[in-house]
Amino acid sequence: MKNSKFSEVKSIKILSRQNQGKTVNEICREHGISQPTFYKWKSKYGGLDIQQLSKMKELEKKLSQYKKIVAELTLENVVMKDVIAKKL
């Protein structure tokens, strides 16, 4: 997958330019992006500010850690059940 030359923070800043009264065409021309890219960003980051984005990233990181813990515990549980079943 191709990495974007725009970070998520920069994308949010570009989206906020629309609230300043600029048209989508002007914004896209100014930053060298296509209109579909602009609207894709808008659907993904619309209504977010930079602080909310950092909070969302932090929560996603915690969620991935919790998912890892649950997967490890589930595996351990399955192994223990298997060992108990073999002993009986």
Image (cartoon, rainbow, N blue to C red):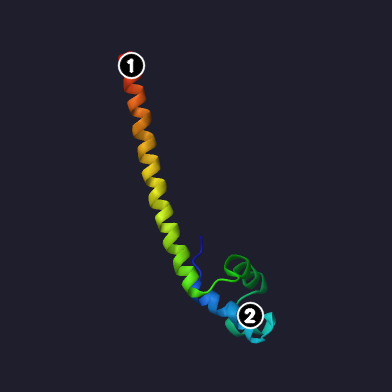
Answer yes or no: is residue 12 visible: yes
Q: In the rendering, which numbered label is found on residue 73? A: none
Q: Residue 72: x and y, percent?
A: 35, 40
Answer yes or no: is residue 7 visible: no
Q: Residue 22: x and y, percent?
A: 66, 86
Q: Residue 50: x and y, percent?
A: 49, 74
Q: Earlier in the sequence, mark 1 or mark 2?
A: 2
Name the front one of labels 1 and 2.
1
Amino acid type of the residue that numbered disc 1 sits on in the rendered structure: Lys
- Image-quadrant location for residue 81: top left
Q: What whole-number distance in Å separates the C-alpha atoms at marks 1 and 2? A: 65 Å
- Give yes or no for contact between labels 1 and 2 (Cβ–Cβ under 8 Å): no
Q: In the rendering, which numbered label is found on residue 86? A: 1
Q: Looking at the image, which residue sits at the far top?
A: 88
Question: Taking 6 as reference, is 73 left or right?
Answer: left
Residue shown at 60% from the left, 83% from the top: 17
Bin the neighbour count of mark 1 within 10 Å (Cα to Cα): few under 14, some 14-19, many 20 and up: few
